[in-house]
Structures are given as structure tokens and as C-alpha cells.
Amino acid sequence: MKKIGLFYGSDTGCTDDITKDFVSLWDSEELDVREIDDVSKEDFDQFRVLILGLSTWYDGDLQSDWEAFFDDFKEIDFTDKVVAIYGLGDQIGYGEYFVDGIGILAKVVLENGGEIIGHWPIEGYRFTDSVAIIEEKEDYFYGLALDHDNESQLSDERLEKWIHQLKLELEPYLVLEEEVVLS
């Protein structure tokens, strides 16, 4: 049984490419990868651990498939769920909305009882504002921020570090899940 649900949306193919890179770096046997335009809110019930991927468009808009699904997303009960989010944005062209999509999804997860892991430092980025910054921990985004437009050369390294971080943070949850299945 797949233990982790990875739900993502991509308009231009950049998030799709990052998701493929993510899957190749992770043990894909654990992942159930689904495009957000082909899911229902009930699909989220199958997983305790979720990874969400999206891009931010224009003035802080969600990627189009996430935008279409957002009303349903807001109704999902994330109680007892652990969620990590990665997002793409343009910190130069849209510096005041950099990776807002991460923050938009994270706030819904938190409001609906979930836990967010995979916080990522803001150091090294050049943006002016972001909804993805954690209010109580202002030096961090809720999740991995990637700028494939201006810093694609850093995407692989950032993704590898984030995956390593996630595996460490998820270890207690995945072990607990195995114990529940075995009992």
C-alpha cells in the first residue's frame, strides 16, 4: 500500500518536471502521485501523509487546477494528517507574490486540523513579500520555494535537501503507520 499521497498541478510543465524529479529522488514505492485536476476531496482521505505541489501565478493566484479545486480543498478535514508543500514562483517578476500558493494551501491545512512539515528558510531568495512566510517563524516558508524562472540552477540542490529533511521529519509518522498496519 502506498503511504504518501502526492497531489500536484501544472500549467506549463515546470511543476510537472519538479514532481518527476521529486519522485525519482524519493522511494517511489511509497508515493501515490496524482494530478489535482483528476481527484476528489475524498481521495485525500486515503492518506495520513500528503505532499502538495503547485505554482503561483500572476498576482498570487493558485495554479489553474488548484484554483478549480480550491472550494473542495477548503472542505477537507486534515485532522491527524501531516502535509508538506512545494511551490514554484517568480521572485523577480512577481516578488510581492512569491510562492503565495504555498501559503494559501498551508493556511487551509492548518485551519482544518492538519500539521505542516518541511518548513524552508527564506535566506538566499530575493523577493519583497509572500503569503508563504510563517507568521510565527518569519525566517521560513511553510514549504519548499523554487524559482525555476530565475534560479533553475538551484532547484535540484534545494529539492534534494528538502527531500532529505522531509524523510527525517516523516520518519516517526511512517514508522507509526507501519505499526498500526502490522497490529
Image (tube, rainbow, N blue to C red):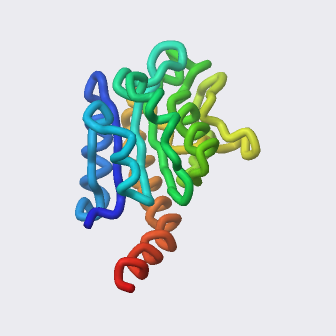
Give residue 28's position: percent from left, percent from top: 25, 59
Q: Residue furthest bottom?
A: 183
Pick the front one: 110 or 76: 76
Pick the front one: 97 or 149: 97
Give residue 177's position: percent from left, percent from top: 42, 73
119 in relation to 179, above or below: above
Q: Residue furthest right?
A: 136
Residue displayed at 37% across by 37% down: 153
Quick check: 7 left or right of 121?
A: left
Quick check: 122 left or right of 11?
A: right
Residue displayed at 54% across by 60% down: 80
Residue displayed at 51% across by 56% down: 82
Q: Quadrant of the N terminus?
A: bottom left
Give residue 9's position: percent from left, percent from top: 33, 32
Which picture quadrant has residue 15? top left
Q: Quadrant of the C terminus?
A: bottom left
Which picture quadrant has residue 18? top left
Q: Is residue 106 visible?
A: yes
